[in-house]
Amino acid sequence: MTTAPKGAALFPASFDPVTNGHLDLVRRAQQVFPELVVAVAQNRDKSGTFTIEERLEMLETVIGDVPGVTLTSFDGLVVDYASEIGARAVIRGLRAIADFEYEFEMALMNRHMKPEVETLFLMTGQEYFYVSSSRLKELVSFGADVSEWVPPIVAEYLAKKFGRR
Amino acid sequence: MTTAPKGAALFPASFDPVTNGHLDLVRRAQQVFPELVVAVAQNRDKSGTFTIEERLEMLETVIGDVPGVTLTSFDGLVVDYASEIGARAVIRGLRAIADFEYEFEMALMNRHMKPEVETLFLMTGQEYFYVSSSRLKELVSFGADVSEWVPPIVAEYLAKKFGRR
Amino acid sequence: MTTAPKGAALFPASFDPVTNGHLDLVRRAQQVFPELVVAVAQNRDKSGTFTIEERLEMLETVIGDVPGVTLTSFDGLVVDYASEIGARAVIRGLRAIADFEYEFEMALMNRHMKPEVETLFLMTGQEYFYVSSSRLKELVSFGADVSEWVPPIVAEYLAKKFGRR
Amino acid sequence: MTTAPKGAALFPASFDPVTNGHLDLVRRAQQVFPELVVAVAQNRDKSGTFTIEERLEMLETVIGDVPGVTLTSFDGLVVDYASEIGARAVIRGLRAIADFEYEFEMALMNRHMKPEVETLFLMTGQEYFYVSSSRLKELVSFGADVSEWVPPIVAEYLAKKFGRR
Amino acid sequence: MTTAPKGAALFPASFDPVTNGHLDLVRRAQQVFPELVVAVAQNRDKSGTFTIEERLEMLETVIGDVPGVTLTSFDGLVVDYASEIGARAVIRGLRAIADFEYEFEMALMNRHMKPEVETLFLMTGQEYFYVSSSRLKELVSFGADVSEWVPPIVAEYLAKKFGRR
Amino acid sequence: MTTAPKGAALFPASFDPVTNGHLDLVRRAQQVFPELVVAVAQNRDKSGTFTIEERLEMLETVIGDVPGVTLTSFDGLVVDYASEIGARAVIRGLRAIADFEYEFEMALMNRHMKPEVETLFLMTGQEYFYVSSSRLKELVSFGADVSEWVPPIVAEYLAKKFGRR
């Protein structure tokens, strides 16, 4: 984990675990913002399926070598972290109406707290509209093979966590 | 009207006429993209309330002097124009769910036509959620004073077009 | 048409023509607001299917005798008329999400123009969710019998306007 | 045009013109209902871009030979036509939330008029979510090439209608 | 519980417990698909209010004798079970927009996993729009009488589970 | 806590804790209904962050002295309580689409249970669209200062409950 470059855009998410949908967003965001900080958001109250360290390991394996991408994690509010690293743009992916409403409300509150940080929405590739970390974990718990929606390293972690059935 | 600078973000709209909501978006977009091309989209089939020239005159008066902002107009597809001027990012404002659906579909189609151009969505300031050019024109036609939602030059144009009542 | 009583709630709509869904709303609104002004909104720019006079005639036949209900028509902005008659509450019916968005935006703008007038939303009875004046006219133009969704007087007016087929 | 087989499912639409999205729906519907009546709905009041004959010609070229598919057109209400041909299921495609609301309301009204006819919704293939006849015509009017979203015969008709630019 | 007949449509749900809304859907689905497999979906991770056995008992009492209906339960993915029993159509009920989004995403993922199984959506009768197993259980926990929304046998089970208050 | 006056409107909510958004709704509702019963809804099954007594203490401090406002709490169904105190109108705030769907369904069910009680929806002030008790508690748990969205007494209670960090 290195220091976030000044002026980079911030892409915060739980990444619990990273999916191909996330990777699609990283690729799209980089087309517009060559310097991107991909940051695992720690939620003090929700424990998550994977530890922050595991999530970073998976991300490291998958996008650790991509030029212009910095991997970090943070604890607290997204806007505070954005201010701390000097990011003016926070990137959030949208898949559907349901996402939109939640994201819209969060973005309004974030804007109120830090008017200098702007939230930008990007559409996920349409082949990932139904892909979310939580849904994939649900599918894995039913014994489904989700390897086409996650990188190989994540498939391994999921198999370890949920048992190979 | 000058040449669009390489690498600028493109903000296309009808601007028929420009409202304070549009200006809010320009200001927000510029926080992230210091170089911005504000472009009046010509619709070959719909005639509009103001001519392209009038729309550009109003924009010129209002944001003609803002450093980093280039005013233009274009005819045809947004993505073709974005490619032509080398813009990688197209900025679109979102006010509400209704906007979102239409914009989402357009963005998917645009992405399909030019995968190298990415659409980024920005939320309009919440004090402008109910402000749109068409609604303001409807209000003016009912004799309402809309001067708080448009720049003074636009209030004049609207009064001229719809008659002072 | 009599003078609107001070303090009554205002229920403005096009009533082009009145449907059983409108009547359901009048009945519901009156449970809460015993004095109700039912007002035909004149749209200077859109001509409508029936004249204001015809719309009032139909309403007169149907709810002219209901105690506490005053029938009127107005030209201009809803909030201006509400202020003029001293109404503090404007009643609007909601049938579905689509209504909600439009109504929500209008109510925000109205609130901004006249903060002392509050918009209150009532749900239409669920048996009227799919009933709107425009849809009924569309059905009539296809030769459908819509008599179960409108009062008899309206069925006659529709038959006259669209021809008995 | 042949007689609709008893018990077939009905897929009514404007098909003005047929798109690959429609064809995708036909294919999906046939997986479930081997006998399918594909019917061009005539709208007495809206003239449309192509005549009913042209629409049927395009459909004939594209799916005229598919076993189990019958091509027809009808004038009037969908449910009346469904009753007439003895169809118990009406198939409608859904692309997005916006479709859903309109379709939902129509289906409720149709159900009320003919309780014995059930509306079944199918999702369009996700690669066609942004494809509609009206959007394609809009794109063509801007000079865009839409040949990947329509069958070759439709591309020709569109070129003839809108002129090759 | 008998073997699912080849070619039947599958109606999977939690049925925890069955409501009159479910029964309405069964009746509607049977109009189109005379052979229907009604299957209780077991969720390995969520325990539910009633056991799978209790849910099947209630269903057995209510629709056990309906010709063409087969009752079963299954563990795992809906699409796997659909494939196993040779069902080409999976029936899902829609009550509202909220349902629609979730169902839409699930159907996209299911389609991706088993392209040969198609999801068909049916609208619940509008008198059941606000009826769901979870809402009814919430009402029962508040001491409400829900007997008009469930069959008598379910009212008894609910009374036993939540205590008669 | 005094007896609810006959004919007052009822504004029921969890108030866990009261926010400035709630206070905005109370103020708006009072413009239309000078007599208002503000009632803390007790949820037998969910324990909540603050006790009913604490919630009432905060409300008492903030709106205890407002003429026309009566503070109470109740256990059970909203409509039963409305009937008990003779309220014909139940007031609910709407912030967004998501609220709308849930509220709409609850209102339909409530209407069915007590047709004589009507639910009226009011829009929250737009500066409170993103303010909800649960979101504020989430922010506080992240160490954020939420004092601009709650009255001072509530800020104190939140600080005590979540610890000053």
Image: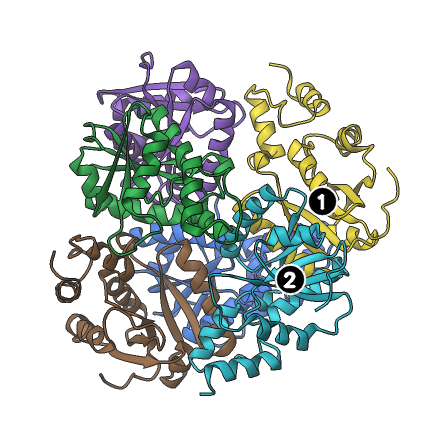
Chain colours: A cyan, B yellow, C purple, D blue, E brown, F green
Amino acid type for the residue under numbered disc 1? Ala
| Outermost top residue | C3
In x, y percent, where is residue B111? 68, 60
Q: For residue B56, which quarter of the picture?
A: top right
Question: In which chain is the residue bearing label 2?
Answer: D
Tell me, yes or no, whether dots 2 and 1 are on the same chain: no
Question: Toward the viewer: A88 or E76?
Answer: A88
In x, y percent, where is residue F115? 20, 40
Q: Residue at x 54, y 74 (%)?
A: D65
E93 up-or-down from B78: above or below: below
Q: Which mark is residue A1?
A: none
Question: Toward the viewer: B3 or D13?
Answer: B3
Q: Nearer the viewer, mark 2 or mark 1?
A: 1
Q: Is residue C119 left or right of residue A125?
A: left
Q: Which mark is residue B29?
A: 1
Task: Look at the numbered disc 2 and give the secondary structure of its residue.
Answer: helix
In x, y percent, where is residue A20? 61, 72
Amino acid type for the residue under numbered disc 2? Val
Question: In which chain is the residue bearing label 1?
Answer: B
Q: Is residue B133 left or right of residue C92?
A: right
Q: Residue at x 49, y 81 (%)?
A: A161
In x, y percent, where is residue D103? 43, 53
Q: Which mark is residue D154?
A: 2
Q: Name the quarter where the C terminus of chain C is drawn.
A: top left
Q: For residue B65, which quarter of the picture?
A: top right
Q: CA distance from mark 2 to mark 1?
A: 40 Å
Q: Are marks 2 and 1 in contact (CB under 8 Å)?
A: no
Question: Toward the viewer: C147 or C108?
Answer: C108
Q: Is residue D87 left or right of residue B52?
A: left
